[in-house]
Image (cartoon, grey):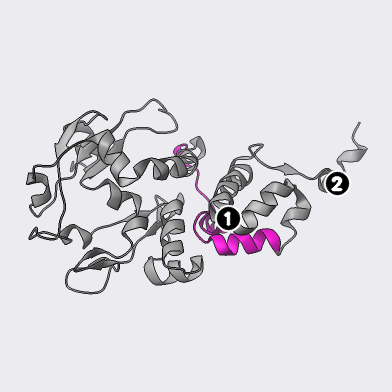
């Protein structure tokens, strides 16, 4: 049986701890400069999309339509967003230039991590699974790994701004590792669409909240309403609470009392002693 890439990494790759050292420096003078920016699958997290579309001053819908492939369903469980590469010989990233990345300050998590990758054996059944970094092996020779500049993993994360991405992505990761999905359950078309809209198409999600009966059905504090009306990061955090409520029935949102009573009467529960 052929091993998957993940299985190979978990079984064979050297583990790097926060204090582990590696050598790396990427600069324009290297002959392989930007070679790693093409013909690669870059899955985007919700926070990646938020940062990139903000940097480009695009609506979420326009960004998704122009720069991503249609949502993928990994094992028919959750929609996943993949960055769309250019249709050229190198399948180059749409943001790479001869000078480097044109959205460098808002580049995705995986680009920040490079030349490191992260592997995890964590699942809903195994929350204590192993998680570690490793040095990515490329088909081409990455000359940056032969440079003299030395880093620890911890230093690299700090230098590349990884911590804020990890913090913002943690609620999303918790949802994707929820026991519901590891038990083999999947989302139907309607809930898959809702998941995609809530995580990635934030402008449409905001319209759903403010231009539908949403706020008349749920108790949302005035301060939260004020924040999510303007702040996309606050909106994304609110969206994760909404998903935990709507997908898993968790008490992350509260239905208004009058709405609950109306539903109770509709179901005839008020006549039950």
* Dot 2: element: helix
Q: Is residue 208 magenta?
A: yes
Residue 151 falls in which quadrant of the image?
A: top left
In the image, the segment drawn in magenta is 182-210
Q: Secondary structure at mark 1?
A: loop
Q: Position of residue 99 (x, y in %)?
A: 20, 66
Q: Residue at x 55, y 56 (%)?
A: 232
Which image quadrant for residue 247? top right
- Residue 259 as seen in the image, left or right of residue 117: right
Residue, x 58% and y 52% (percent of image)? 235
Viewer-proximal residue among 106 and 134: 106
User: How far apart are the alpha carbons under marks 2 and 1?
Assistant: 29 Å
Mark 1 surroundings within 10 Å by alpha-carbon count, few (fewer than 14), some (14 through 19), many (20 or more)? few
Q: Main secondary structure of the magenta part?
A: helix
Residue 124 is one of the magenta-drawn residues = no
Quadrant of the snapshot with the C terminus: top right
| In contact (CB < 8 Å): disc 2 and disc 1 | no
Percent from the top left, x then y, of residue 210? Answer: 69, 61
Residue 14 position within the rendered picture, expressed as x and y whole percent measured from the top left: 16, 32
Answer left or right for 139 relative to 220: left
Residue 146 in the image: above or below residue 132 = below
Quadrant in which residue 56 is drawn: bottom left
- Tag 1 residue: 231
Q: Quadrant of the N terminus?
A: top left
Return the x and y of residue 211 as percentages of the image width and height: 70, 64
State whether residue 166 appears in this view: yes
Q: Residue furthest bottom?
A: 88
- For the image, the number of numbered tags is 2
Q: Earlier in the sequence, mark 2 or mark 1?
A: 1
Residue marked by disc 2: 258
Relative placement, left or right, of 217 versus 165 is: right
Q: Between residues 98 and 216, which one lies in front from this camera angle?
A: 98
């Amino acid at each position: 049986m052929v091993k998957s890439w993940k299985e190979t990494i978990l079984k064979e790759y050297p583990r790097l701890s926060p204090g582990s050292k590696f050598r790396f420096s990427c600069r324009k003078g290297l002959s392989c400069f930007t070679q790693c920016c093409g013909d690669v699958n870059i899955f985007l997290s919700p926070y990646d999309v938020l940062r990139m579309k903000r940097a480009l001053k695009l609506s979420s819908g326009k960004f998704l339509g122009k720069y991503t492939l249609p949502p993928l369903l990994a094992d028919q469980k959750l929609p996943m967003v993949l960055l769309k590469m250019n249709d050229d010989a190198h399948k180059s990233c749409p943001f790479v230039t001869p000078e480097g990345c044109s959205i460098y300050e808002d580049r995705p998590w995986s680009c920040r991590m490079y030349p490191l990758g992260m592997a995890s054996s964590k699942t809903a059944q195994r929350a204590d699974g192993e998680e570690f970094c490793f040095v990515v092996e490329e088909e081409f020779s990455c000359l940056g790994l032969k440079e003299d500049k030395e880093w620890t993993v911890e230093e690299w994360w700090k230098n590349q701004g990884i911590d804020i991405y990890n913090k913002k992505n943690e609620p999303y990761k918790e949802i994707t590792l929820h026991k519901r999905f590891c038990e083999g359950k999947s989302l139907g078309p309607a809930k898959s669409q809702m998941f995609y809209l809530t995580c990635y198409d934030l402008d449409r999600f905001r319209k759903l909240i403010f231009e539908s009966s949403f706020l008349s059905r749920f108790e949302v504090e005035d301060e939260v309403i004020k924040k999510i009306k303007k702040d996309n990061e606050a909106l994304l955090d609110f969206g994760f609470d909404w998903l935990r409520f709507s997908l898993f029935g968790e008490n992350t949102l509260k239905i208004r009392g009058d709405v609950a009573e109306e539903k109770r009467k509709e179901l005839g529960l008020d006549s039950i002693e």
